[in-house]
Amino acid sequence: MQVYYKKAFDETVGPRYLTGAPPPGQAEDRYRRTRAANEYLTDHYHEAPVWIVACLEGGSPTRSAGSSIYPAVQNMLLAARALGLGATLTTRHLQYEQETEAAMGIPPGFHSYAILPIGHPMGRFGPLARGPLADVVYLDGWGKPYPGI
């Protein structure tokens, strides 16, 4: 698994961080810290003491097929944080879906949609902050301001 996770970082995620601009509402220094954290996770992915692999039974995975699984995944992430654990939702393994599912022993007819590596954080969590709603909430079209925000 580690080999494929790292390979996907080297081929796709890493170059995107190096050449891409921060998303709206995220400062450049925070974007660099996010990249560093992503790279650290990549190098230490295999050391997470627990992986929750969210799977569904059924045909070919589609963008909407996982819609029933992601709310459960979000609840697991919130529970981990409430317990003081570090966790994140990852889907990078899907770039090598057949290889990674075989490595994990997922039986035919089932597909993974996310992996949550869970462990104890290296430091303490800081406060969470959200960007301005005006950066992400629109009315009647993308980029059209929502009145009153």
Image (spheres, helix red, strand yellow):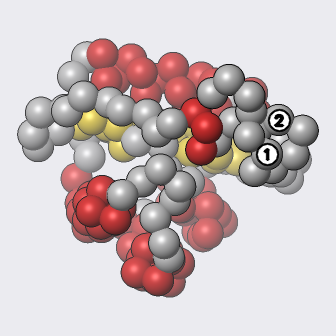
Q: Secondary structure at mark 1?
A: loop
Percent of width and height locating residue 29: 27, 62
Q: Is residue 68 above or below residue 34?
A: above
Q: Is residue 7 above or below residue 22?
A: below
144 to the left or right of 124? right
**Viewport quadrant of the C terminus:** top right
Q: Residue furthest front?
A: 148
Q: Is residue 31 above or below residue 145?
A: below
**Residue at the (48%, 72%) spot, across then down:** 21
Give yes or no for contact between labels 2 and 1 (Cβ–Cβ under 8 Å).
yes
**Residue at the (53%, 55%) spot, across then down:** 24
Percent of width and height locating residue 74: 53, 27
**Residue at the (87%, 45%) spot, across then down:** 141
Q: Amino acid at mark 1?
A: Lys
Q: Secondary structure at mark 2?
A: loop
**Residue at the (11%, 43%) spot, across then down:** 122
Q: Is residue 36 above or below residue 82?
A: below
**Residue hosting label 2:** 139
Looking at the rendering, which quadrant does residue 5 occupy?
A: bottom left
- Whole-Å distance between the Cαs marked 2 and 1? 6 Å
**Residue hosting label 1:** 144
